[in-house]
Image (cartoon, rainbow, N blue to C red):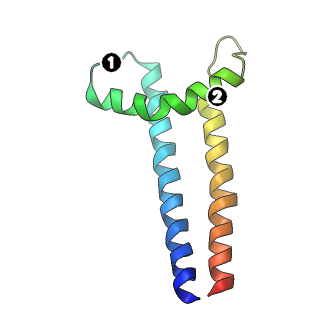
Amino acid sequence: MFIFSNFLTALAVVVDYALVIYMWIVIARAVLSWVSPDPYNPIVRFIHNLTEPVLYQIRKRVPVIFGGIDLSPIIVFLAIIFLRKFVVSSLYGLAQSLG
């Protein structure tokens, strides 16, 4: 069973790193929205292409209030924090109980 325990620990680490990296990409997207970046810059396009599908789905469901402020990055942050606390911690706990 220790092999499955190690697998779950490794999976928890990978999921945690992926969520942290995505959080930083969303932060970069929010900072880029404050300035007027070149839309043809490959880095700007990469960040936009990674974040827009998630932010678009949130924008469809959450109305824009507070004078036009986009709350979708904040909702993504809260979702990432929830996933890190719930999913990653659950994977770590399950791995410890098996090992």
In the picture shown, does residue 92 fall above or below 41?
Answer: below
In the picture shown, does residue 48 fall above or below 91?
Answer: above
What amino acid type is highlighted by mark number 2?
Answer: Ile
- Of residue 38 and residue 61, the one placed in the foreground of this image is 61
- Where is residue 14? Give x, y as percent: 48, 63
Quarter of the image that includes the C terminus = bottom right
The structure residue drawn at horizontal position 55% and vertical position 88%, both measured from the top left corner, is 2
Q: Nearer the viewer, mark 1 or mark 2?
A: 2
Do we see residue 69 in this rendering? yes
The structure residue drawn at horizontal position 55% and vertical position 66%, both measured from the top left corner, is 12
Q: Quadrant of residue 61?
A: top right
- Where is residue 41? Give x, y as percent: 27, 24
Q: Secondary structure at mark 1?
A: loop
Quarter of the image that includes the N terminus = bottom right
Question: Within 10 Å of the Cα at label 2, are there few (<14), some (14-19), or many (20+) other Cα atoms?
Answer: some
What amino acid type is highlighted by mark number 1?
Answer: Pro
Q: Name the residue carrying label 1.
A: 39
- Where is residue 19? Give x, y as percent: 53, 51
| Residue, far top | 67
Do we see residue 71 in this rendering? no
Q: Secondary structure at mark 2?
A: helix
Q: Quadrant of residue 94?
A: bottom right
Q: Name the residue carrying label 2.
A: 58
